[in-house]
Amino acid sequence: MGIRKENKEKGIDKYSSKLLYLSAILVVSGLLALIFILDFATSFSKTESFASFDQMKYDKEAERLSKMEELDSYWKVPEIYLIKDSAYKQQVIYGQELIMHTSRYLGPNGSVENLSNGMNCQNCHLDGGTKIWGNNYAGVASTYPKVRARSGQMEGIEKRVNDCFERSLNGRALKDDSKEMKSIVAYIKFLGKHVAKDSVPQGTGIYDLPFLSRAADPSKGAGVYTNLCASCHGASGEGMMAQNQLEYTYPPLWGPNSYNSGAGLFRLSRLAGYVKYNMPYGASSLNPQISDEDAWDVAAFINSQPRPSKDISKDWPKIAKKPIDHPFGPFSDGFTEIQHKFGPFGPIAAEKKKKK
Ligand code: HEC
Ligand code: HEC
Protein backbone atom coordinates (compact mmCIF):
# COMPACT_ATOMS: atom_id res chain seq x y z
CA MET A 1 0.00 0.00 0.00
CA GLY A 2 2.83 2.23 1.01
CA ILE A 3 4.67 1.43 -2.20
CA ARG A 4 1.59 1.92 -4.37
CA LYS A 5 0.95 5.18 -2.72
CA GLU A 6 4.53 6.12 -3.32
CA ASN A 7 4.27 5.06 -6.95
CA LYS A 8 1.05 6.89 -7.32
CA GLU A 9 2.60 10.00 -5.85
CA LYS A 10 5.60 9.56 -8.12
CA GLY A 11 3.17 9.16 -11.09
CA ILE A 12 1.39 12.32 -10.16
CA ASP A 13 4.74 14.03 -9.73
CA LYS A 14 5.81 12.86 -13.14
CA TYR A 15 2.51 13.93 -14.60
CA SER A 16 2.49 17.36 -12.99
CA SER A 17 6.08 18.12 -13.92
CA LYS A 18 5.26 17.25 -17.52
CA LEU A 19 2.30 19.58 -17.30
CA LEU A 20 4.47 22.27 -15.85
CA TYR A 21 7.01 21.77 -18.61
CA LEU A 22 4.34 21.93 -21.28
CA SER A 23 2.71 25.03 -19.89
CA ALA A 24 6.12 26.72 -19.60
CA ILE A 25 6.69 26.01 -23.28
CA LEU A 26 3.25 27.30 -24.08
CA VAL A 27 3.82 30.49 -22.09
CA VAL A 28 7.22 31.11 -23.68
CA SER A 29 6.00 30.46 -27.19
CA GLY A 30 2.93 32.57 -26.48
CA LEU A 31 5.21 35.39 -25.39
CA LEU A 32 7.37 34.92 -28.44
CA ALA A 33 4.29 35.03 -30.65
CA LEU A 34 3.11 38.15 -28.88
CA ILE A 35 6.49 39.82 -29.33
CA PHE A 36 6.49 38.81 -32.96
CA ILE A 37 2.98 40.16 -33.50
CA LEU A 38 3.77 43.40 -31.68
CA ASP A 39 6.96 43.84 -33.62
CA PHE A 40 5.17 43.17 -36.86
CA ALA A 41 2.41 45.56 -35.95
CA THR A 42 4.77 48.39 -35.00
CA SER A 43 6.96 47.87 -38.03
CA PHE A 44 3.83 47.82 -40.13
CA SER A 45 2.64 51.07 -38.59
CA LYS A 46 6.14 52.44 -39.07
CA THR A 47 6.00 51.77 -42.79
CA GLU A 48 2.53 53.24 -42.70
CA SER A 49 3.86 56.48 -41.22
CA PHE A 50 6.80 56.47 -43.60
CA ALA A 51 4.35 56.18 -46.42
CA SER A 52 2.29 59.11 -45.20
CA PHE A 53 5.45 61.16 -44.57
CA ASP A 54 6.51 60.45 -48.14
CA GLN A 55 3.03 61.37 -49.27
CA MET A 56 3.30 64.65 -47.38
CA LYS A 57 6.65 65.43 -48.95
CA TYR A 58 5.23 64.47 -52.30
CA ASP A 59 2.17 66.70 -51.81
CA LYS A 60 4.34 69.63 -50.76
CA GLU A 61 6.61 69.17 -53.76
CA ALA A 62 3.60 68.84 -56.06
CA GLU A 63 2.17 72.04 -54.63
CA ARG A 64 5.49 73.82 -55.09
CA LEU A 65 5.78 72.57 -58.68
CA SER A 66 2.24 73.57 -59.54
CA LYS A 67 2.84 77.01 -58.03
CA MET A 68 6.02 77.22 -60.09
CA GLU A 69 4.13 76.14 -63.18
CA GLU A 70 1.59 78.83 -62.42
CA LEU A 71 4.44 81.31 -62.06
CA ASP A 72 5.81 80.04 -65.33
CA SER A 73 2.61 81.13 -67.01
CA TYR A 74 2.91 84.59 -65.42
CA TRP A 75 5.63 86.34 -67.37
CA LYS A 76 8.69 85.18 -69.23
CA VAL A 77 11.61 87.56 -69.01
CA PRO A 78 13.32 87.85 -72.40
CA GLU A 79 17.02 87.03 -72.56
CA ILE A 80 19.38 89.89 -73.35
CA TYR A 81 22.07 87.54 -74.66
CA LEU A 82 19.77 86.57 -77.53
CA ILE A 83 19.74 90.10 -78.95
CA LYS A 84 21.50 90.08 -82.32
CA ASP A 85 21.97 93.80 -83.07
CA SER A 86 25.05 94.68 -81.06
CA ALA A 87 24.43 98.44 -80.71
CA TYR A 88 20.91 97.73 -79.44
CA LYS A 89 22.26 95.03 -77.13
CA GLN A 90 24.79 97.47 -75.66
CA GLN A 91 22.03 99.98 -75.03
CA VAL A 92 19.80 97.44 -73.28
CA ILE A 93 22.72 96.24 -71.15
CA TYR A 94 23.53 99.82 -70.12
CA GLY A 95 19.86 100.37 -69.29
CA GLN A 96 19.88 97.29 -67.09
CA GLU A 97 23.07 98.48 -65.41
CA LEU A 98 21.44 101.88 -64.70
CA ILE A 99 18.42 100.17 -63.11
CA MET A 100 20.58 97.86 -60.99
CA HIS A 101 23.27 100.37 -59.97
CA THR A 102 21.62 103.75 -60.54
CA SER A 103 23.60 105.49 -57.84
CA ARG A 104 27.01 104.57 -59.29
CA TYR A 105 26.09 106.75 -62.29
CA LEU A 106 23.52 109.25 -61.05
CA GLY A 107 23.75 109.26 -57.24
CA PRO A 108 25.51 111.73 -54.91
CA ASN A 109 28.92 110.42 -56.06
CA GLY A 110 27.74 109.28 -59.48
CA SER A 111 30.08 109.18 -62.47
CA VAL A 112 27.63 110.75 -64.97
CA GLU A 113 25.58 113.28 -63.02
CA ASN A 114 24.40 113.83 -59.45
CA LEU A 115 20.64 113.88 -59.42
CA SER A 116 19.37 111.17 -57.05
CA ASN A 117 19.56 110.18 -53.39
CA GLY A 118 21.88 107.18 -53.43
CA MET A 119 19.22 104.55 -53.94
CA ASN A 120 19.06 102.25 -56.96
CA CYS A 121 15.93 101.59 -58.99
CA GLN A 122 16.58 97.92 -58.21
CA ASN A 123 16.20 98.56 -54.47
CA CYS A 124 12.45 98.61 -55.19
CA HIS A 125 12.25 97.04 -58.67
CA LEU A 126 13.92 93.80 -57.66
CA ASP A 127 16.23 91.73 -59.86
CA GLY A 128 16.53 94.57 -62.34
CA GLY A 129 12.75 94.88 -62.51
CA THR A 130 12.13 91.23 -63.44
CA LYS A 131 10.99 89.57 -60.21
CA ILE A 132 7.42 88.25 -60.09
CA TRP A 133 5.47 90.51 -57.68
CA GLY A 134 8.79 92.29 -57.07
CA ASN A 135 7.53 95.58 -58.56
CA ASN A 136 8.66 94.43 -62.01
CA TYR A 137 8.32 96.21 -65.35
CA ALA A 138 6.28 93.50 -67.12
CA GLY A 139 3.36 95.82 -67.85
CA VAL A 140 5.14 99.07 -68.75
CA ALA A 141 5.85 98.62 -72.48
CA SER A 142 2.34 97.28 -73.05
CA THR A 143 0.45 100.06 -71.23
CA TYR A 144 2.42 103.27 -71.93
CA PRO A 145 1.92 105.91 -73.17
CA LYS A 146 -1.25 106.35 -71.15
CA VAL A 147 -3.23 109.00 -69.28
CA ARG A 148 -2.33 108.77 -65.62
CA ALA A 149 -4.73 110.03 -63.01
CA ARG A 150 -1.93 111.29 -60.74
CA SER A 151 -0.87 113.91 -63.31
CA GLY A 152 -4.09 113.99 -65.31
CA GLN A 153 -1.86 113.89 -68.40
CA MET A 154 -0.76 111.58 -71.15
CA GLU A 155 2.56 110.10 -70.02
CA GLY A 156 5.25 108.22 -71.84
CA ILE A 157 7.70 105.86 -70.16
CA GLU A 158 10.18 108.74 -69.76
CA LYS A 159 7.76 110.72 -67.61
CA ARG A 160 7.04 107.66 -65.47
CA VAL A 161 10.75 106.98 -65.01
CA ASN A 162 11.28 110.60 -63.97
CA ASP A 163 8.41 110.32 -61.49
CA CYS A 164 10.48 107.70 -59.67
CA PHE A 165 13.64 109.85 -59.95
CA GLU A 166 11.81 112.80 -58.37
CA ARG A 167 9.90 110.86 -55.74
CA SER A 168 11.30 107.40 -55.00
CA LEU A 169 14.88 108.63 -55.43
CA ASN A 170 13.97 112.07 -54.08
CA GLY A 171 15.97 113.66 -56.88
CA ARG A 172 15.74 115.54 -60.15
CA ALA A 173 14.50 114.47 -63.57
CA LEU A 174 16.79 112.96 -66.18
CA LYS A 175 16.67 114.61 -69.63
CA ASP A 176 14.50 112.67 -72.05
CA ASP A 177 17.16 112.76 -74.79
CA SER A 178 20.09 111.75 -72.55
CA LYS A 179 21.92 108.50 -73.25
CA GLU A 180 20.90 107.31 -69.79
CA MET A 181 17.15 107.89 -70.23
CA LYS A 182 17.20 106.34 -73.70
CA SER A 183 18.97 103.26 -72.33
CA ILE A 184 16.61 102.88 -69.37
CA VAL A 185 13.60 103.12 -71.68
CA ALA A 186 15.16 100.66 -74.16
CA TYR A 187 15.71 98.15 -71.33
CA ILE A 188 12.17 98.53 -69.95
CA LYS A 189 10.67 98.18 -73.44
CA PHE A 190 12.83 95.14 -74.08
CA LEU A 191 11.54 93.46 -70.90
CA GLY A 192 7.93 93.91 -71.99
CA LYS A 193 8.37 93.08 -75.65
CA HIS A 194 6.37 89.81 -75.56
CA VAL A 195 3.50 91.31 -73.58
CA ALA A 196 0.46 92.04 -75.75
CA LYS A 197 -0.56 95.70 -76.07
CA ASP A 198 -2.77 96.87 -73.18
CA SER A 199 -2.43 93.57 -71.33
CA VAL A 200 -0.71 93.03 -68.01
CA PRO A 201 0.56 89.53 -67.17
CA GLN A 202 -0.10 87.88 -63.80
CA GLY A 203 2.57 88.77 -61.27
CA THR A 204 3.12 92.27 -62.67
CA GLY A 205 4.15 95.08 -60.33
CA ILE A 206 3.18 94.89 -56.67
CA TYR A 207 0.78 92.36 -55.16
CA ASP A 208 -2.56 93.74 -53.91
CA LEU A 209 -2.61 92.47 -50.35
CA PRO A 210 -6.15 91.85 -49.02
CA PHE A 211 -7.30 94.65 -46.70
CA LEU A 212 -7.37 94.13 -42.95
CA SER A 213 -10.73 94.69 -41.27
CA ARG A 214 -8.98 97.07 -38.86
CA ALA A 215 -6.65 100.03 -39.31
CA ALA A 216 -2.97 99.11 -39.70
CA ASP A 217 -1.18 99.69 -36.40
CA PRO A 218 2.22 101.48 -36.34
CA SER A 219 2.93 100.47 -32.73
CA LYS A 220 2.45 96.77 -33.56
CA GLY A 221 4.55 97.41 -36.67
CA ALA A 222 7.42 98.71 -34.54
CA GLY A 223 7.75 95.25 -32.98
CA VAL A 224 7.65 93.56 -36.39
CA TYR A 225 10.33 95.98 -37.60
CA THR A 226 12.66 95.15 -34.71
CA ASN A 227 12.21 91.42 -35.22
CA LEU A 228 12.31 91.11 -39.01
CA CYS A 229 13.82 94.21 -40.57
CA ALA A 230 16.20 96.14 -38.32
CA SER A 231 19.04 93.62 -38.73
CA CYS A 232 19.57 94.88 -42.29
CA HIS A 233 17.83 98.25 -42.56
CA GLY A 234 19.16 99.53 -39.22
CA ALA A 235 17.48 100.48 -35.94
CA SER A 236 16.71 103.95 -37.32
CA GLY A 237 15.81 102.80 -40.85
CA GLU A 238 19.01 104.40 -42.14
CA GLY A 239 20.20 101.37 -44.11
CA MET A 240 23.86 100.59 -44.76
CA MET A 241 26.14 101.97 -47.47
CA ALA A 242 28.30 99.58 -49.46
CA GLN A 243 32.05 99.77 -48.90
CA ASN A 244 32.52 101.67 -52.17
CA GLN A 245 30.25 104.46 -50.76
CA LEU A 246 28.47 104.56 -54.11
CA GLU A 247 25.29 102.63 -53.35
CA TYR A 248 23.53 100.84 -50.53
CA THR A 249 24.00 97.27 -49.42
CA TYR A 250 20.79 97.77 -47.41
CA PRO A 251 18.77 100.76 -48.58
CA PRO A 252 17.23 103.24 -46.10
CA LEU A 253 13.52 102.98 -45.27
CA TRP A 254 13.10 106.46 -43.83
CA GLY A 255 15.11 109.56 -42.98
CA PRO A 256 16.76 112.11 -45.32
CA ASN A 257 18.06 109.53 -47.83
CA SER A 258 14.83 107.62 -48.34
CA TYR A 259 11.87 108.00 -50.75
CA ASN A 260 9.80 111.15 -50.29
CA SER A 261 6.17 111.65 -49.35
CA GLY A 262 5.11 111.79 -53.01
CA ALA A 263 6.48 108.31 -53.77
CA GLY A 264 4.43 105.21 -54.55
CA LEU A 265 5.69 103.39 -51.46
CA PHE A 266 4.28 106.14 -49.27
CA ARG A 267 0.89 104.59 -50.06
CA LEU A 268 0.35 101.87 -47.50
CA SER A 269 -1.03 99.26 -49.93
CA ARG A 270 2.06 99.58 -52.14
CA LEU A 271 4.50 99.21 -49.25
CA ALA A 272 2.58 96.37 -47.57
CA GLY A 273 2.20 94.48 -50.85
CA TYR A 274 5.87 94.95 -51.69
CA VAL A 275 6.97 93.72 -48.25
CA LYS A 276 4.61 90.72 -48.24
CA TYR A 277 6.25 88.97 -51.21
CA ASN A 278 9.78 90.40 -51.05
CA MET A 279 10.90 91.04 -47.48
CA PRO A 280 12.77 90.03 -45.39
CA TYR A 281 15.14 89.87 -48.37
CA GLY A 282 14.86 86.46 -50.05
CA ALA A 283 11.12 86.10 -49.54
CA SER A 284 8.99 85.58 -52.66
CA SER A 285 5.44 84.72 -53.61
CA LEU A 286 6.53 81.05 -53.51
CA ASN A 287 8.05 81.54 -50.10
CA PRO A 288 6.50 84.47 -48.20
CA GLN A 289 7.92 85.04 -44.74
CA ILE A 290 5.57 87.54 -43.15
CA SER A 291 1.85 87.41 -42.32
CA ASP A 292 -0.56 89.83 -44.01
CA GLU A 293 -1.19 91.58 -40.68
CA ASP A 294 2.50 92.03 -39.95
CA ALA A 295 3.08 93.37 -43.47
CA TRP A 296 0.35 96.02 -43.04
CA ASP A 297 1.50 96.94 -39.54
CA VAL A 298 5.19 97.24 -40.40
CA ALA A 299 4.23 99.36 -43.43
CA ALA A 300 2.21 101.63 -41.11
CA PHE A 301 5.23 101.92 -38.82
CA ILE A 302 7.69 102.75 -41.65
CA ASN A 303 5.38 105.32 -43.24
CA SER A 304 4.92 107.04 -39.84
CA GLN A 305 8.63 107.89 -39.65
CA PRO A 306 10.16 111.16 -40.90
CA ARG A 307 11.15 111.39 -44.58
CA PRO A 308 11.68 114.10 -47.21
CA SER A 309 8.48 115.78 -48.31
CA LYS A 310 7.45 116.68 -51.84
CA ASP A 311 5.08 119.36 -53.03
CA ILE A 312 2.32 117.27 -54.54
CA SER A 313 -0.34 119.98 -54.67
CA LYS A 314 -0.59 119.50 -58.45
CA ASP A 315 -1.17 115.73 -58.13
CA TRP A 316 -4.57 114.19 -58.68
CA PRO A 317 -6.28 117.11 -60.46
CA LYS A 318 -9.47 115.04 -60.25
CA ILE A 319 -9.82 114.40 -56.53
CA ALA A 320 -12.24 111.52 -57.00
CA LYS A 321 -9.49 109.60 -58.83
CA LYS A 322 -7.18 109.51 -55.80
CA PRO A 323 -6.42 105.94 -54.75
CA ILE A 324 -8.18 105.05 -51.50
CA ASP A 325 -4.85 104.90 -49.65
CA HIS A 326 -3.56 108.27 -50.88
CA PRO A 327 -2.63 109.77 -47.53
CA PHE A 328 -3.28 113.46 -48.26
CA GLY A 329 -6.61 115.29 -48.51
CA PRO A 330 -8.79 116.79 -49.78
CA PHE A 331 -10.93 113.75 -50.58
CA SER A 332 -14.16 113.32 -52.46
CA ASP A 333 -15.58 111.16 -49.66
CA GLY A 334 -16.22 111.78 -45.96
CA PHE A 335 -13.39 109.62 -44.60
CA THR A 336 -10.58 111.21 -42.59
CA GLU A 337 -6.99 111.62 -43.72
CA ILE A 338 -5.95 109.17 -40.98
CA GLN A 339 -8.29 106.51 -42.33
CA HIS A 340 -7.04 107.12 -45.88
CA LYS A 341 -3.51 106.58 -44.58
CA PHE A 342 -3.93 103.56 -42.26
CA GLY A 343 -7.35 102.09 -43.06
CA PRO A 344 -9.62 100.30 -42.47
CA PHE A 345 -9.79 100.54 -46.26
CA GLY A 346 -12.78 98.23 -46.84
CA PRO A 347 -15.43 100.90 -46.17
CA ILE A 348 -13.62 103.48 -48.35
CA ALA A 349 -13.37 100.98 -51.21
CA ALA A 350 -17.04 100.02 -50.82
CA GLU A 351 -18.16 103.64 -51.02
CA LYS A 352 -15.96 104.29 -54.05
CA LYS A 353 -17.52 101.27 -55.76
CA LYS A 354 -21.04 102.52 -54.99
CA LYS A 355 -20.29 105.89 -56.60
CA LYS A 356 -19.07 104.31 -59.84
C1 HEC B 1 11.59 103.56 -53.21
C2 HEC B 1 11.13 102.62 -54.16
C3 HEC B 1 11.30 102.87 -55.63
C4 HEC B 1 12.47 103.20 -56.31
C5 HEC B 1 13.83 103.38 -55.72
C6 HEC B 1 12.11 103.30 -57.69
N1 HEC B 1 10.80 103.04 -57.87
FE1 HEC B 1 9.78 102.97 -59.63
N2 HEC B 1 8.07 102.52 -58.66
C7 HEC B 1 7.95 102.39 -57.29
C8 HEC B 1 6.56 102.17 -56.97
C9 HEC B 1 5.99 101.95 -55.57
C10 HEC B 1 5.85 102.18 -58.17
C11 HEC B 1 4.35 102.03 -58.39
C12 HEC B 1 3.92 100.60 -58.33
C13 HEC B 1 2.43 100.46 -58.28
O1 HEC B 1 1.72 101.46 -58.38
O2 HEC B 1 1.96 99.34 -58.13
C14 HEC B 1 6.84 102.41 -59.21
C15 HEC B 1 6.53 102.45 -60.57
C16 HEC B 1 7.46 102.59 -61.59
C17 HEC B 1 7.15 102.48 -63.00
C18 HEC B 1 5.77 102.19 -63.59
C19 HEC B 1 5.44 100.74 -63.48
C20 HEC B 1 4.12 100.37 -64.09
O3 HEC B 1 3.88 99.15 -64.25
O4 HEC B 1 3.32 101.24 -64.39
C21 HEC B 1 8.33 102.67 -63.67
C22 HEC B 1 8.52 102.65 -65.16
C23 HEC B 1 9.36 102.89 -62.68
N3 HEC B 1 8.79 102.82 -61.44
C24 HEC B 1 10.68 103.12 -62.95
C25 HEC B 1 11.66 103.37 -61.98
C26 HEC B 1 13.01 103.73 -62.29
C27 HEC B 1 13.59 103.83 -63.69
C28 HEC B 1 13.64 103.89 -61.10
C29 HEC B 1 15.05 104.35 -60.87
C30 HEC B 1 15.39 105.61 -61.48
C31 HEC B 1 12.69 103.62 -60.06
N4 HEC B 1 11.49 103.32 -60.63
C32 HEC B 1 12.99 103.64 -58.72
C33 HEC B 1 8.96 102.44 -56.36
C34 HEC B 1 10.26 102.77 -56.63
C1 HEC C 1 18.57 90.25 -44.93
C2 HEC C 1 18.50 91.68 -45.07
C3 HEC C 1 17.13 92.32 -45.14
C4 HEC C 1 16.08 92.20 -44.25
C5 HEC C 1 16.05 91.38 -42.97
C6 HEC C 1 15.03 93.04 -44.75
N1 HEC C 1 15.43 93.66 -45.89
FE1 HEC C 1 14.37 95.04 -46.96
N2 HEC C 1 15.84 95.11 -48.34
C7 HEC C 1 17.03 94.42 -48.29
C8 HEC C 1 17.80 94.68 -49.49
C9 HEC C 1 19.18 94.11 -49.80
C10 HEC C 1 17.02 95.54 -50.28
C11 HEC C 1 17.39 96.06 -51.67
C12 HEC C 1 17.31 94.96 -52.69
C13 HEC C 1 18.07 95.23 -53.96
O1 HEC C 1 18.62 96.32 -54.14
O2 HEC C 1 18.16 94.30 -54.77
C14 HEC C 1 15.80 95.82 -49.51
C15 HEC C 1 14.79 96.66 -49.95
C16 HEC C 1 13.70 97.03 -49.18
C17 HEC C 1 12.72 98.04 -49.54
C18 HEC C 1 12.71 98.90 -50.79
C19 HEC C 1 13.83 99.90 -50.80
C20 HEC C 1 13.73 100.96 -49.76
O3 HEC C 1 14.75 101.18 -49.08
O4 HEC C 1 12.69 101.61 -49.60
C21 HEC C 1 11.80 98.06 -48.53
C22 HEC C 1 10.58 98.97 -48.45
C23 HEC C 1 12.17 97.06 -47.56
N3 HEC C 1 13.34 96.46 -47.97
C24 HEC C 1 11.47 96.80 -46.41
C25 HEC C 1 11.82 95.78 -45.51
C26 HEC C 1 10.98 95.39 -44.40
C27 HEC C 1 9.68 96.05 -44.01
C28 HEC C 1 11.63 94.37 -43.77
C29 HEC C 1 11.15 93.57 -42.59
C30 HEC C 1 9.86 92.94 -42.73
C31 HEC C 1 12.86 94.12 -44.49
N4 HEC C 1 12.93 94.99 -45.55
C32 HEC C 1 13.80 93.19 -44.14
C33 HEC C 1 17.46 93.61 -47.26
C34 HEC C 1 16.70 93.24 -46.17
Image (cartoon, grey):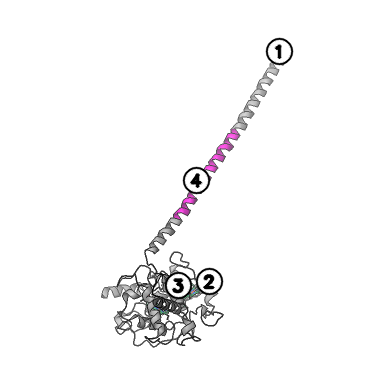
Residues at discs 1 and 3 in contact (Cβ within 8 Å): no
- Amino acid tagged 1: Arg
- Amino acid tagged 3: Asp
> If you read the primary sequence from the N terminus, does the residue marked by circle 2 or circle 3 appear first?
3
Tell me the residue that label 1 is attached to.
4
Of the two numbered discs 4 and 3 in the rendering, the one whose residue sits closer to the viewer: 3
User: In this orientation, which residue lies closer to the viewer: 139 or 32?
Assistant: 139
Q: Which residues are magenta?
A: 30-59
**Residue 228 part of the magenta-drawn span:** no
The answer to whether the residue bearing label 3 lies less than 8 angstroms from the nearest atom of ligand 2 is yes
Tag 2 secondary structure: helix
- Amino acid tagged 4: Glu
User: Are there few (<14), some (14-19), or many (20+) residues within 10 Å of tag 1?
Assistant: few
Q: Quadrant of the N terminus?
A: top right
Name the residue at 45% across, 70% down: 278
Tell me the residue that label 3 is attached to.
127
User: In this orientation, which residue lies closer to the viewer: 156 or 236?
Assistant: 156
The answer to whether the residue bearing label 2 lies less than 8 angstroms from the nearest atom of ligand 2 is no
> If you read the primary sequence from the N terminus, does the residue marked by circle 1 or circle 3 appear first?
1
> If you read the primary sequence from the N terminus, does the residue marked by circle 1 or circle 2 appear first?
1
Residue 49 marker: none
Residues at discs 2 and 3 in contact (Cβ within 8 Å): no
Residue 338 in view in this figure: no
> If you read the primary sequence from the N terminus, does the residue marked by circle 2 or circle 4 appear first?
4
User: In this orientation, which residue lies closer to the viewer: 304 or 318?
Assistant: 318
> If you read the primary sequence from the N terminus, does the residue marked by circle 4 or circle 3 appear first?
4
User: Are there few (<14), some (14-19), or many (20+) residues within 10 Å of tag 2?
Assistant: few
User: Are there few (<14), some (14-19), or many (20+) residues within 10 Å of tag 3?
Assistant: some
Of the two numbered discs 1 and 2 in the rendering, the one whose residue sits closer to the viewer: 2
Q: Alpha-carbon distance for marks 4 and 3?
A: 44 Å
